[in-house]
Image (cartoon, rainbow, N blue to C red):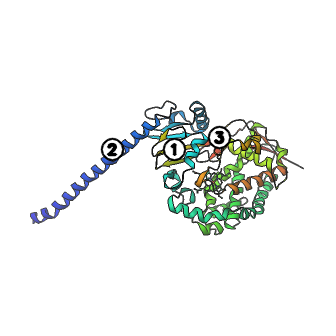
Amino acid sequence: MASLLDNIVRPSAVVLQLSVVLGIIFVLLKVVQFYQERKKLIKALEAFPGPPKHWLYGHNHLVRRELSSIRIVSWGEEYPYAFPRWFGPVLPSLIIHHPEYAKSILGRTGKSLHLLVTPLLFVSPGQGLLILNGTKWFQHRKLLTPAFHYDVLKSYVDLMSDSVKVMLDKWEKKNTEKSVELFQDVSLMTLDSIMKCAFSYNTNCQTQRSALELSNSGKAKGTWQDTEEETPGFSGHSSFGSATQSPLLPLKHSLTPQFAFREDLGKMTYTTMCIKESLRLFPPVPAVSRCLSKSVTFSDGRSLPAGLLSLPLLLPQVYDPLRFSPENSAQRHSHAFLPFSAGSRNCIGQQFAMNEMKVALALTLLRFKLCPDPSKPPRLLPQLILRSSNGIHLHLRKIH
Ligand code: HEM
């Protein structure tokens, strides 16, 4: 009996030992591979001088959340073109802040370019265009592109203005003696309008809380949803909500010439310039990241093997919409202003967003004069999207 048991147990013990040994070899090989890749990357990064790093924290301890954009921009001034940014002891990235460099990365197509997305995004249900890669991304992008055609978007203007009017009606009823926090309302307005345009569905989310919950449950059906499980609307919604506040943010400088918005709705040249300048100063998507699966050589001859790359879009300077006048824009590098990114993976919703920002601004400024509240300046928090951690507080003065 004992020898029978021995015969059964022995082979399985051998298999177990073998699997453990194979497992250890596999892990060791992976560690060696990781170490060699890191070594190659570190060697390549030596060509890019950057701020001194801590052996354990990298640059994390130097980049506090609310000040990170300021810190990154000041490093950008010190280290031209690109500089390394370490997230801890083993995870490097290269921060790029030169248009030619950005072009070298964003101009690439095909498999060499992988979108880097934070694990957080994978928690969202479905697979939106934003997080797809390869053939599946290409197919979905091709299917969705006609939905953003100029003529289709034109038909949304009335729906957008309906949503804006609901928001403005709410503001009419507010006590305007004190400053008002506007970010929540603007966010709800963008959600409301995207639900109407993309799903032909009226959520009433601006006026009813329960309607907002229904819209979050994804029960609505409509045009864009027919093309994709998760619509681009939701990938766009958060950046969009944050974007629609962007033209309001420069008000803290008290420099936005408000009368200028009340111009010919068809052209809106000056309004467009103000919106672009706001997107430059307060980019709703402050950085896009790419993970290269093939090496790249930049215009100055420096190169980088496959690895992590990051492209910050944040370049705060003086508020001056005139830098977007046709004459000034003509002289600018095509990749110097990238609020919607560029290349094949640029923002599919950019025209939609621009239209809505124009409609929202024009209608708002017809009814209100907006003034900053110096006691509650926005505290910028660059995360996946840029937002103000304390909201946007403005004084609303009704125009009679
Ligand atoms: C002002 C508002 C907006 C800004 C600043 C913005 C910005 C961006 C940026 C920078 C990217 C590239 C992200 C990356 O490469 O990592 C992007 C991608 C994307 N955006 Fe927007 N976005 C806005 C509004 C919208 C809206 C309203 C929609 C939908 C209606 C939308 C849908 C998308 C989609 C689907 C992608 C992924 C495209 C792809 O990978 O092929 N965005 N957006």
Which amino acid is tagged 3?
A: Leu
Could you tell me which secondary element the residue under label 1 belongs to?
strand
Which amino acid is tagged 2?
A: Val
Front of the two marks 2 and 3 = 2
| Label 2–label 1 contact, CB within 8 A | no
Residue hosting label 3: 380
Cα separation between marks 2 and 3: 41 Å
- Is residue 188 visible to us here? no
Q: Position of residue 133 (x, y in %)?
A: 51, 58
User: In the image, which disc is placed on residue 324?
Assistant: none
Could you tell me which secondary element the residue under label 2 belongs to?
helix
Residue hosting label 1: 309
Q: Is residue 347 left or right of residue 156?
A: left
Disc 2 or 3, which lies upstream in sequence? 2
Cα separation between marks 2 and 1: 22 Å
Which amino acid is tagged 1?
A: Leu
Q: Is residue 204 above or below residue 306?
A: below
